Amino acid sequence: MLVRCYLALLVLGGRALGAVHGRPRGEAGFSTAEGLAGAALAVIALVAIWGALKALGMDVVDWMRSQIIK
């Protein structure tokens, strides 16, 4: 569920920035806005994970562990 939220945020962030499709042909480089958007999304994902761990405690940790071990 957290991964789906993170991916949705990445897609929305890419659309908001206009990603590659909205740029003129001469602008193919990495912009500061893209870097800041990526950093903001990472912080949001970390806060969501932290909140889930606080709310659900060891249940989430055990679930993650079982998913990794599979």
Image (spheres, rainbow, N blue to C red):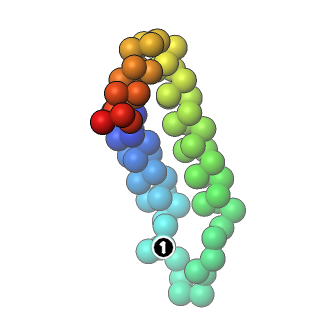
The quadrant holding residue 29 is: bottom right
The amino acid at mark 1 is Val
Kind of element beneath mark 1: loop
Q: Quadrant of the N terminus?
A: top left
Q: Residue at x 47, y 59 (%)?
A: 14
Q: Residue at x 50, y 28 (%)?
A: 49
Q: Can residue 70 be seen by looking at this rendering? A: yes
- The residue identified by callout 1 is 20
Q: Quadrant of the C terminus?
A: top left
Residue at the farthest bottom position: 26
Q: Give residue 23's position: percent from left, percent from top.
A: 52, 77
Q: Residue at x 36, y 34 (%)?
A: 69
Q: Residue at x 45, y 51 (%)?
A: 10
The mark tally for this picture is: 1
Examine the rendered structure and indicate whether residue 34 appears above or below residue 43: below
Residue at the farthest right position: 32
The quadrant holding residue 68 is: top left
